[in-house]
Image (cartoon, rainbow, N blue to C red):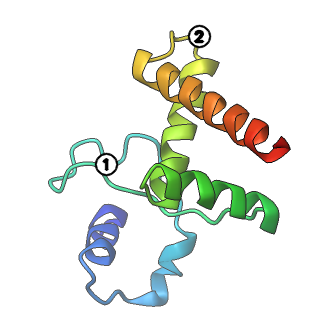
Amino acid sequence: MSRKELLDKVMAGDSVDHSYGDPAEWRVEPGAFEAHPDGEVMVGRSLRLPAHTYERVMAVANDRRMSFSALLRVWVDEGLAAADGAEADPVVALRHGLDQARRAADQLASRV
């Protein structure tokens, strides 16, 4: 059985013969799932953050009515676009401006 077939079984929730190793430790080559029949495949990775950073991220996610993972995907995509030198999406730029304005308003309100 190929690795792709094994990964497809894992993703479908089927049991897998662990003589192939722990599926959580398998490495996926870039582009391995471009033509996956279920569409875009999400790859899980562990991320360790200081507790105060996690709480700040969760607060932003809650404000935006997004999940923690969805917010991090947005931030990673924005960071990758910036690293590639791409122009910022106007909606993203507006959201950043609104976030900055909200933080400034909160700081001003706390001074009163």
Q: Residue at x 53, y 74 (%)?
A: 24
Query: What is the three-letter code of the residue carrying label 2?
Result: Gly
Q: Residue at x 15, y 53 (%)?
A: 37
**Residue linked to disc 1:** 33
Numbered tag placed on residue 85 in the rendering: 2
Query: How far across and how far down the image is residue 53, in percent?
Result: 77, 57
Query: How far across and how far down the image is residue 8, in percent?
Result: 27, 68
In the drawing, does residue 3 fall left or right of residue 24? left
Residue 44 lies, with reference to residue 57, above or below; the image says below
Q: Residue furthest left?
A: 37
Query: How far across and how far down the image is residue 85, in percent?
Result: 59, 10
Q: Quadrant where the C terminus lies?
A: top right
Decide which of tag 1 and tag 2 comes sooner along the chain: 1
Q: Residues within 10 Å of mark 1 (few under 14, many from 20)?
A: some
Residue 108 lies, with reference to residue 6, above or below; the image says above
In the drawing, does residue 85 fall left or right of residue 23? right
Numbered tag placed on residue 99 in the rendering: none
Q: Residue at x 21, y 50 (%)?
A: 39
Q: Quadrant where the N terminus lies?
A: bottom left
Viewer-proximal residue among 94 and 69 = 94
